[in-house]
Amino acid sequence: MKLKHGAATLVLGVQYGDEGKGKLVDVLAEQAELVCRVQGGNNAGHTIWVNGEKIVTQLLPSGILRENCEIGIGAGVVVDPFVLRDEIKKIKSQGYDITPERLHVDYRASVILPYHKNMDLKRELERSKNTTKIGTTGRGIGPTYASRAYREGPRIAEIASPENFKNWLKANPYLAEGLEGKLLDEFLETAELLRPYMKDLAMIANNRLSQGARVLLEGAQGAMLDVSFGTYPYVTSSNLVAGSCAGGLGIPPWKISSILGVIKAYSTRVGNGPYPAELSGPFADELRKRGHEFGTNTGRPRSVGWLDLVALRYLAKINGLTGLAIMKADVLAGIEHIGLITNYNDKRTNKEMNGYPMTQNAWDNVEPVIEFMDGWENVAVGSNLNKNYKAFVKKIEEFIDVPSAYISTGAERSEGIWLA
Ligand code: IMP
Ligand code: MG
């Protein structure tokens, strides 16, 4: 796929996160001048394989490995300064150049404080007593977005000057909880270290677009975890759908020229909440092992299941997908029959569910209808897709009415076929 000059391309997860967006962004970033994160924080985790070396990022966009492009952390992101400091250091030690000329962190991104992390863990502990635990990543994401909504949490702009930040804490003393003494000193030193990266990224992005740059927006998590359109309340705390992404950076929506939805050929979910596709038993264990389906971030085993075409068709519309990227079909190689969820029945009536589930109760009553297709030994030989796999891709395309653009055939950045 050729990225368009003077336009933005959006890469979105349309399952529950961990679809392989990181790899796709890394591949596309070869052509880009600017790559930006627009929501979430270090709850995300991207794994990219380059010449057998595993590179993991949480906060930095996957474009970081392409030295041809600038990278940005947009106003819609929540930033843990310690995590950003450590990640810059780690990626630098792996041989990649990160300078204030290359990395821009928007002044308006919200800051994760120890208070937010503690609050995240505390609330989860409370919820676990009455079985409503969300299974968050414990990184303070939800409380930080809540602080923003309360208009009390500091942003990058507020930590840019130690005086400002101290005054901010004086005005909102509860936010200083856990940030005293040595840790406060370390926090202020970290803010100082990060200061050269703090910019008006929104204006930089708009200027670059006017100059004809190709901009990539790297979505976080997946649309099933969107705070409005996901399986609420078992979701993350930001909007993830396409319509919100321009706002997470500060560019006009009409500058986005294509919206690539990323899926795996099967599905995974980490954390709690409805997951009608879920499989269990030895087959699920095997699939989890083959796909290395353990959280990049937290190491938690992911639940695994078949690809859910009902949810995907719904999300393709909500997000206006212009193309699909299908990842990890190689993980399914050798499995005789591959399942696809093609309908939702209602456990209460034994009939087709009436409309897309809107409540948790409705989700809990989804009985998935699974169709099976013949599997494949190899996804492709050279650039020729296996016949059965081709039929699988066609089935998805027709079901959701979106053409596929990219087929990943392995973990390395070189392993993939562009169809558009
Ligand atoms: P939070 O974003 O840490 O508040 O977690 C809320 C929910 O989103 C939990 O189910 C997490 O497991 C899930 N989640 C958050 N970030 C990711 C991600 O990058 N990949 C997959 N799941 C995620
Ligand atoms: Mg991930």
Image (spheres, rainbow, N blue to C red):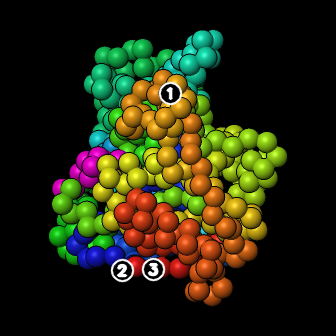
Residue designated by label 3: 419
Dot 2 falls on a residue whose secondary structure is loop
**Quarter holding residue 390:** bottom right
Near-viewer residue (218 or 325) = 325
Dot 3 falls on a residue whose secondary structure is loop
Q: Is residue 243 magenta?
A: yes
Query: Magenta part of the protein: which range?
Result: 241-252
Dot 1 falls on a residue whose secondary structure is loop
Mark 2 sits near ligand 2, with its Cβ under 8 Å away? no
Q: Residue furthest right?
A: 282
Confirm whether residue 249 shows in the render.
no
Which badge, 1 or 3, comes first in the chain's sequence? Answer: 1
Q: Nearer the viewer, mark 3 or mark 2?
A: 3
CB under 8 Å between discs 2 and 1: no
**Quarter holding residue 388:** bottom right
The crowding category of the residue bearing disc 1, from other C-alpha atoms within 10 Å (few below 14, some 14 to 19, many at least 20), is few
The amino acid on which the numbered mark 1 sits, given as a three-letter code, is: Thr
| Quadrant that contains the N terminus | bottom left
Instruction: From the viewer's perspective, tell me whether residue 153 is left or right of residue 84.
Output: left
Mark 1 sits near ligand 1, with its Cβ under 8 Å away? no
Expressed as whole percent of the image width and height from the top left, the position of residue 24 reads 50, 67
Q: CA distance from mark 1 to mark 3?
A: 42 Å
Residue designated by label 2: 2
Question: Can you say whether 47 is above or below 388 in the image?
Answer: above
Expressed as whole percent of the image width and height from the top left, the position of residue 351 reads 49, 35
Instruction: From the viewer's perspective, tell me whether residue 298 is left or right of residue 81.
Output: right
Expressed as whole percent of the image width and height from the top left, the position of residue 234 reads 50, 30
